[in-house]
Image (tube, rainbow, N blue to C red):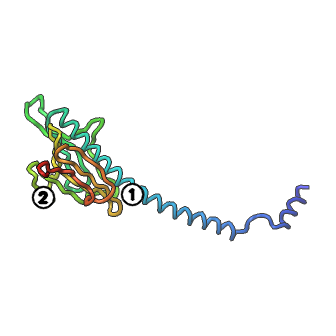
């Protein structure tokens, strides 16, 4: 009976030809390739967003710690455009000397950019209200114990995706914007205007 059933299936032409199988494989490969390209673009966009959010969180942390510890904290940008870190000064108990240290704790670690992410635009103002030179090898935002900071607008991106972070001088608060730095505002207010 089993041989009879196999003959009937062959006669009816059930099964797939090699051409049909290859066509299905080609369609699956095409759909997979399109989906893969979409995923790569999303991954790159997420790397930019992650770096921008890390910068925002480090700026918030720097402001809080400057107020809490009553000493300045500096958010330093890597001269090689590879990341950023937070530093402060501490008295060495052995020597009694003040030393600059990199902040590394549960909440804060130096950040290294991944992929094509970099600082695309950096506009810093010193405590005296003067623009900082972009060629300055040590670019930093200083957060002071009174809650204020140096004004800054930065753009982090990869050429396609952009995020801007603005730090307001008077309050030291940082804000994240989706888009370019030209859209970000530092929120300075002139109280003398009537």
Q: CA distance from mark 1 to mark 2?
A: 30 Å
Q: Nearer the viewer, mark 1 or mark 2?
A: 2
Q: Residues within 10 Å of mark 1 (few under 14, many from 20)?
A: some
Q: Element at badge 1?
A: helix
On the image, which quarter does residue 59 sit in? top left
What residue occupies the far front of the structure in this picture? 194
Q: Element at badge 2?
A: loop
Picture residue at 25% right of the left edge, 38% below the top: 104
Relative to 23, does residue 97 appear above or below in the rendering?
Answer: above
Picture residue at 24% right of the left edge, 51% below the top: 166
Instruction: Return the disc, 1 or 2, that comes first in the chain's sequence.
Output: 1
Picture residue at 43% right of the left edge, 57% below the top: 42
Regarding residue 116, the answer to whether it shows in the image is no
Of residues 151 and 18, the one drawn nearer to the viewer in this rendering: 151
Question: Which residue is tagged 1?
Answer: 44
**Residue 78's x, y, as percent?**
21, 52
> Which labelled disc corresponds to residue 99?
none
Relative to 102, does residue 151 appear above or below in the rendering?
Answer: below
**Residue 117's x, y, as percent?**
31, 57
Relative to 122, does residue 167 appear above or below in the rendering?
Answer: above
Question: Which residue is tagged 2?
Answer: 133
Regarding residue 40, the answer to whether it shows in the image is yes
């Amino acid at each position: 009976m089993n041989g009879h059933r196999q003959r009937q299936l062959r006669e009816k032409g059930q099964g797939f030809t090699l051409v049909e199988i290859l066509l299905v494989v080609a369609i699956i490969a095409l759909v997979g390739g399109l989906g893969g390209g979409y995923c790569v673009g999303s991954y790159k966009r997420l790397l930019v967003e992650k770096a921008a959010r890390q910068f925002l969180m480090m700026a918030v942390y720097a402001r809080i710690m400057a107020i809490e510890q009553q000493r300045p904290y500096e958010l330093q940008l890597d001269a090689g455009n590879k990341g950023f870190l937070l530093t402060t000064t501490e008295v060495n108990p052995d020597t009694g000397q003040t030393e600059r240290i990199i902040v590394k704790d549960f909440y804060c670690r130096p950040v290294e950019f991944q992929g094509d992410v970099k600082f695309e635009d950096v506009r810093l103002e010193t405590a005296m209200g003067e623009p900082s030179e972009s060629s300055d090898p040590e670019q930093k935002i200083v957060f002071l114990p009174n809650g204020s900071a140096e004004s800054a607008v930065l753009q982090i991106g990869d050429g396609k995706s952009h995020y801007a972070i603005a730090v307001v001088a008077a309050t030291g608060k940082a804000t994240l914007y989706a888009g370019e730095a030209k859209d970000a505002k530092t929120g300075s207010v002139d109280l003398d205007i009537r």
